[in-house]
Image: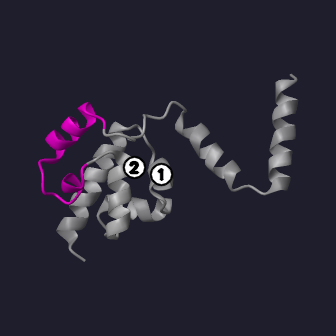
């Protein structure tokens, strides 16, 4: 593994993710990888495949040249953010806790969803 390349990708991905106010879990979900793998990418301990690199670029709205270290990272990110590319994600409006709960509910069993629904109804009644 090319450690310098991995660190460049990780640093640029973290910077772009933070500018979008996303958690690592949010970014991983948008990219379509596990949160653990995305965290390894940000730490420079894993190199994404080319398709995953393209999804990182698209999901975080950062140029692939920035990710691989072929551009001045901060300046390029600043310019790419001032002119948001078509389809770039809008900063999330929900707090990270709510986004985390929504992710967990999407993976929940029907029985768990019924239980949570009943709990919410009960709490709303108070």
Binning the other alpha carbons within 10 Å of mark 2 as few (below 14), some (14 to 19) or many (20 upward) gives: many
Per the image, label 1 sits on a secondary structure element best described as helix
Relative height, residue 125 to residue 119 (above, below): above
- Quadrant in which the C terminus is drawn: top right
**105 left or right of 21?**
right
Judge by depth and name the residue closer to the eye, 64 or 126: 64
Pointers 2 and 1 in contact (C-beta within 8 Å): yes
* Residue marked by disc 1: 30
Instruction: Judge from the rendering whether residue 9 lies leftward or rightward of residue 102; answer left or right.
Output: left
Q: Residue at x 88, y 24 (%)?
A: 125
> Is residue 65 inside the magenta stretch?
yes
Q: In the image, what residue occupies the spot 25% across and 53% down? A: 11
**Residue 113 percent across, percent down from the top left:** 80, 48
| Furthest residue toward bottom | 1
Residue labelled with disc 2: 59
Could you tell me residue 91's position as x and y percent? 43, 34
Give the residues drawn in magenta, as a range. 63-84
């Amino acid at each position: 593994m090319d450690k310098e390349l991995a660190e460049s990708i990780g640093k640029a991905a973290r910077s772009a993710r933070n500018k979008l106010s996303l958690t690592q879990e949010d970014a991983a979900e948008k990219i379509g990888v596990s949160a653990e793998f995305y965290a390894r990418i940000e730490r420079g301990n894993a190199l994404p495949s080319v398709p995953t690199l393209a999804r990182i670029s698209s999901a975080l709205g950062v140029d692939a040249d920035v990710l691989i270290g072929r551009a001045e990272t901060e300046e390029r990110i600043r310019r790419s953010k001032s002119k948001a590319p078509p389809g770039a994600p809008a900063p999330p409006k929900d707090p990270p806790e709510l986004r985390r709960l929504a992710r967990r509910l999407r993976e929940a069993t029907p029985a768990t969803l019924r239980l949570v629904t009943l709990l919410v109804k009960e709490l709303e009644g108070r």
